[in-house]
Amino acid sequence: MSPSCHVALHYFPEVSSDVLRELSGFLFIIHRLKTPSDTVKPRAVVMSEPKAPTPAPGDTYKGWLFKWTNYIKGYQRRWFVLSNGLLSYYRTQAEMGHTCRGTINLATANIAVEDSCNFVISNGGTQTYHLKASSEVERQRWITALELAKAKAVRMQPESDESGDDSTPPASGQGAGSRNSEVQSTLRTLSSKVEDLSTCNDLIAKHGSALQRSLSELEGVRLGGETSEKFRQVTERATLFRITSNAMINACQDFLTLAQTHSKRWQKALQSEREQRVRLEETLEQLAKQHNHLERAFRGATVLPSSQSNPSIDSKGPVPVKGDASDEDDENEFFDACEDVQEFITVPADPKYHRRSGSNVSGISSELGMDDGTTSLDEQSLASNPESPQSQELVPVRKRRSRIPDKPNYSLNLWSIMKNCIGKELSKIPMPVNFNEPLSMLQRLSEDLEYYELLDRGAKCQNSLEQMCYVAAFTVSSYSTTVHRTGKPFNPLLGETFELDRVQESGYRSLCEQVSHHPPAAAHHAISERGWTLRQEIALASKFRGKYLSIMPLGSIHCIFEKSTNHYTWKKVTTTVHNIIVGKLWIDQSGEIDVVNHKTGDRCHLKFAPYSYFSRDVARKVTGVVTDKDGKAHYVLSGTWDEKMEYSRVMQSSRGGENGAEGRQKTVYQTLKAKELWRKTPLPEGAENMYYFSTLALTLNEPEEGVAPTDSRRRPDQRLMEQGRWEEANAEKQRLEEKQRTVRREREREANRTASPSEEGKEPADGGGHQDNYTPMWFERLVDPMTGETTHIYKGGYWEAKEQGSWDSCPDIF
């Protein structure tokens, strides 16, 4: 017999041996609970082993449940959090920090079980949650947690005013006050639990005593031997029950006493930690000021050789001091490891790089081909670039409009669309302007230049890898204007053009032309006085997949920098429009982009992560790695396509653990602190009433004098829609489409008359216009020497014709 059994036999001689074994095991647990404070953690583990993971009242409980949404989507998986008497839910765990989808107060809620996995929570008003667990056990855990939390919330309601006074943080410091209030709240919770147990113990003792008295009276009654044995067993069980409840109360009281004893020590330790942190912050601030002072003194007393000086600094002007040293300080800071992604992992660089970048800046600069602080210096010198056109100071810049008429709230009558479809071919059915926005596809293509400053900075870079970072950020920035733009742009008419002349304001001018209608394709050419050229031909292919529409842009985008002759190419990712049939439209971008420098072999691989309800990553995430021709990584890019992009310099790379089920090893990059490459400009005030147009988009359809007769600004149906006259716009749109069909039939008949019998039905020799037998006005179809693709390239003449006002050769398309 164990020592615990001997102890039990000494105190309870009337108890049988079977009960003694159970009692001895419980006494062993009580002995573990009453050991000194250094074994508090082990006894908590021992107590929790035989019990299910059901939370106590007031504890936080989290997990996945399925919530009924509607008859179309049914049950959807949501992340639920039970805390402080409130049940809240989120789409993902990542949303917990910023977006709560709903909260219900359990103090006034009713909890009902429907079947083995389903249950309902309702507050008797507008909030009713129909929930489903993955199993019956999981449902029971949630029901238990909810009932306990509800009881706690009901009990704590009258005490909320009093407890609010106790939890006020002291004036000594906000951080220490919050910690002190947290400790006090924990102690109050523990005290409340012990009081609950004490109440239960009083009831148990009261009813247990009554039970034992009744049993004692029954023992005096003379009955058979078997009945007496049963009475004796019942008495033993009642005694054991009383013993266990008393022991549990004593253990909880000991725990509360221990917590109260140590509370002052905890508060003192927290206060000491806070004071130490304040001292460290003050010391770091003093060191930073000394560092800046020494660096300015060094820059003022030392003249670097031209081969080592920063290439982006103009040697004729003084070196700007503001922001210079702070940027280098940022370069030497390190950041926490980024969240795990599929291709690679980034971790803080080894401290040796920190020391090296502080003592041997030029060594790292020469190794990576980039000096510290280049980004900030480029930004400063960009504003005072001596190569920029000086005409901005002499010629007043035109003031562009900042508003357009608000979008009318017209309801869409489906019958008005269907009645126009009766007896017509599918290709001739006119789509109403209700689905459009008052811009053409050519103007949307010109919006790629919204953040042209990135290319201006790239043109000033001496290092191709750094230049690649700016080009990659530019490719991502072109999607930032699409996040809320669910309206469809007008399909350009064949031969339609759009010019964007921003030489005075921004140093560039752009021209787009619709070069083909079947299939639809548009050519774009932009040139800047700051040393870069952008050209592209984009054709669109689309697939309707029931609930969403996928739009795949076809064609390559070219960016050429005049000074370095670096030639970059890339393609666009897939755009997906969700909830085409039912629900609110929303847009997502997904896919991969390879930006290639054909001169140096440098490459940047960008990945646009598709949106997922179950992903823990931030929505609209973009990641990328910049590598040289040998495949060595130099920069890691990260951000979102609707907000910002950052870059981090790679100091070292290595192979890490396996990548999940695929079994591939991830690459681990040791990087310095991330720097911002690009950030989206906030939308203008009232943009939600103006089709969510950006500042640039608001000016694209503004009337201008001197533009070509084929310019999108002169398109009447688009202008009528912008003015809110949608019925007239629909009629005008139908007239223009019918006119285009008539012109196309006439062009086909003319081509058949002039062609020889053997050439009838063939495409023209130059391939111009694809299947349209149309030759563009300002672009010609050539084979691109870099990609080998046949594409339309600007042949010149437009801006000269504009200066002369000579538009006689332009077709009449409107």
Image (spheres, grey):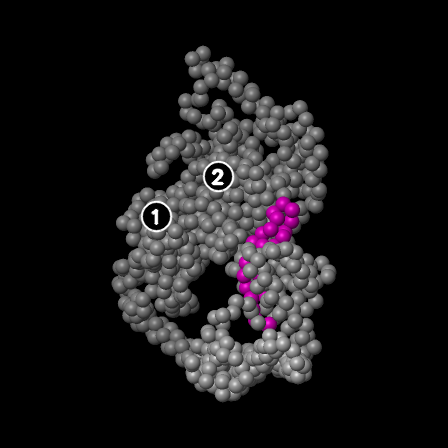
Q: Mark 1 or mark 2, which has the lower sequence index?
A: 2
Query: Which mark is in front, 1 or 2?
Result: 2
Residue 328 visible: no
* Amino acid type assigned to the residue bearing label 1 in the image: Arg
In the rendered structure, find residue 711 and report the number of the disc placed on it.
none
Q: Position of residue 608 (x, y in %)?
A: 45, 49
Query: Callout 2: 10 Å neighbours few (<14), some, many (20+)?
Result: some
**456 relative to 183 in the view: left or right:** left
Of all residues, the one furthest to the right in this rendering is: 125
In which quadrant of the rendered image does the C terminus lie? Answer: top right
Q: Position of residue 480 (x, y in %)?
A: 51, 50
Specify whether residue 69 is painted magenta: yes
Q: Which residue is mark 1?
A: 603
Q: Position of residue 601 (x, y in %)?
A: 30, 46
**666 relative to 205 in the view: left or right:** left
* SS majority, magenta: strand
SS for callout 2: strand
Marks 1 and 2, how far apart in space? 22 Å
Q: Please tell me which residue is depicted at 47% across the width and 70% down the height of the picture.
A: 49
Front position in the image: 757 or 202: 202
- Which segment is the magenta one? 57-82
Q: Please tell me which residue is depicted at 58% across the width and 81% down the height of the picture.
A: 239
Q: Which residue is mark 2?
A: 552
Looking at the image, residue 702 lies above or below residue 518? below
Looking at the image, residue 591 lies above or below residue 215? above
Q: Please tell me which residue is depicted at 69% across the width and 42% down the height of the picture.
A: 724
* Amino acid type assigned to the residue bearing label 2 in the image: Met
**540 relative to 420 in the view: left or right:** left
Specify whether residue 88 is painted magenta: no
